[in-house]
Image (tube, rainbow, N blue to C red):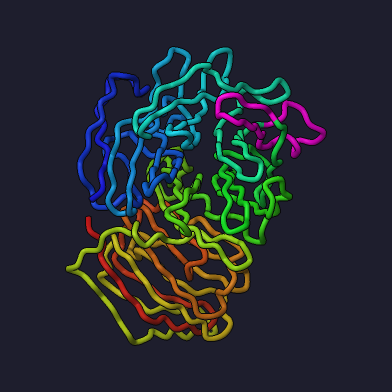
Amino acid sequence: MGWVLILFFSCTPAFRENFEPSVQPVEDLQYFKPQEEKYFAGDPMPFFHEGIFHVYWLLDYNHVPAGHAWAHFSTADLQHWTHHPLALTITLPFEKSICTGSVIFHNGLYYAFYATRTQDNGRTEFVSYAKSSDGISFIKQQPNPLIIAPQEYESAHFRDPHVFYDDSSKKFHMLITTALRKADLEKNRYCLLRYTSKDLIHWTCQGPFYYTGSDKGFAYPECPDLFKWNGWYYLLFKIYGGTYYRMSHSLNGPFVAPPSDNLSNDYAMVLKTAPFGEQRRIAVGFIPSRAGNKDDGQWTYGGNLVFRELVQKADGTLAAVFCEEMMPAIDSGFHYEVQEEYCVDSPDRFAYYALKNVPVNARIRMKVDPMGPNTSTGMLLRYGERGFYELSFDAAANKVNLGNTSIERVKGLDVPFEVDVVMKHDIIDVCIDRRRCILNRCPEQKGNQLLLFVHNGKVSFKNLIIEKLKE
C-alpha cells in the first residue's frame, strides 16, 4: 500500500516550520501527485541505501519556481511505500527556494546537497548541504553557502549539485549546472562544473567537466546524474525537457552521444536514477502540467511523478521502459482478451478496425505486425465525436507520434513489435517493445472507442488485451 500526501498550509506557500503534512493510503505511486489543490510534484532525486529506495522530490506550489521544499517517499519493493515528513524546507530569511540536489551516505550519515535560490540583488543560486542520521530528518549545516559560483561563472545559474563517490580516484565528485559568463562562442558557455572532495565538506573546483549539447540545441544542462554500471560511466542531463545521456569507459571521458541519446520525450522530464538491488536501476521523472488544462496548452512546471526502469543493452546503450512493479492497479471486473488477429488492409487509403466500449482509464497491450511497407500504422485512442489521440508508428522515418508530441530514431517499426499503452486520467503513457517510451498529457478527449488503423499498407494486430484501471 502506498501513500498520498495531504497538504495543510498557512497563507504562505513557502513550507516553513508551521507546515503540517499528513498521510492517506493510495494503491500505487506511478503518476502520483499531491491531492491538495495547487500542489504538484517536481524534480525527483532518487537514492538507494541498504535495500531501501528513496524518492526525494520537489514539492511545487501553483507551478511557481520558488518556495519549493523536499518531500520524501521510500520503499523496499517498489510496491509498498512509506511517506515521510518534509525532508528540507525554507527556514532561513535569505532562502526563496530549496532546489534540486542529491543525497549520499558516508560514515553513518546521510548528506543532502541542494541549491538555494535567493532574490537578493537579482537571482542568485549557490550550493548548501544538510546532514541526517536516518535519511528522514535533515539539519542544515554551516557554512551556508557551502559553494558559490566562481567569478567567471553565472551566479544566477549555479544549481542542481549531483554528488557521487568514485573508487578509482578515491574522492567524492560534485557536478553543478552552470555557464561561463563569457566564451568564444555562445555554444561553448553551458557546462557542468566539477568539484572534488575527500570529506564532503571541503571542495576544490576542477573546472568544466562537460560542455553540453543535444539535437535540440545548447542550453543549461540541468539536473545532472552520473553513475557507473557494468563497466560504463553514464552522464545524464536535462535540456529543453528531454533527458539526454552520454557514455564513456572512463570518468574523465570522452563522453560520447549514442545514436539515440534522449531517454525520454519532453513529457517525461528530469529523469534521475538510483540502483535498486544489485543489477537494476530505476529512473524517476515528472510529467509537467499543461496550461489551462488543454491538449495544446504549454507545459508548466510541476505535475505527476513517473517511474521507468533502465535497461542496459549489449553495446552499453540504455533504454528507459515501464517498471512492472509500478504499473497502475487493474480492476479485475473488466478484462478483454482476443487471441485472433485483426488484419487491416488498405493499399491506397486510410482504413481501420473499431473497438467500442473501451474504458477511458485502461491498459492496452498488443503486437503490431506490419505485413509490408505502409505510410503509417497505429491506433486512435479515446476516439469519440469530439476527437481522439493518434498513436502512430512511421517505420520509414523511425518516428512515433502520440498526440502533439513525438520521439525519433525508433528503429524496428517495420517488423513485429509489442505495444503497451496506459491511459490514466489525463496521462497517456506508451512503451514500444520494451525499447522506448513516449508519454503525453491529454486532458480533453474522453471517447470510449479504440481504432486500429493502417495508412497505405497492410498490418495485423495480435494478442490484444484491454484491462480497466482501478479508479
Is residue 187 covered in magenta? yes
- For this view, does 165 lie left or right of residue 103? right
Q: Is 355 situated left or right of 198 in this image?
A: left
> Quick check: 298 above or below 318?
above
Q: Between residues 53 and 311, which one lies in front from this camera angle?
A: 53
Q: Nearer the viewer, residue 304 or 273?
A: 273
x and y percentages locating residue 396 in the rendered image: 62, 73
Q: Is residue 89 shown left or right of residue 268?
A: left
| Residue 103 in sight from this viewpoint | no
Residue at screen point 66% across, 34% down? 194
Left/right of residue 395 with respect to residue 268 in the rendered view = right
Q: Is residue 348 visible?
A: yes
Residue 226: give x, y in percent of width and height. Answer: 58, 45
Relative to 358, does residue 190 appear above or below in the rendering?
A: above
Residue 78 in the image: x percent, y percent? 34, 53
- Residue 225 position, x and y percent, is 56, 44
Which residue appears farthest toward the left when viewing the image?
333
User: On the image, which quarter does residue 91 sit in?
Assistant: top left
Marks counted in the figure total 0
Residue 232: quarter of image: bottom right
Residue 112 on the magenta segment: no
Q: Quadrant of the C terminus?
A: bottom left
Between 156 and 273, which is closer to the camera in this rendering?
273
Q: Which residues are magenta?
A: 179-205
The structure residue drawn at horizontal position 66% and vertical position 41%, both measured from the top left corner, is 169
20 versus 465 height, above or below: above
Q: Residue at x 33, y 64 (%)?
A: 384
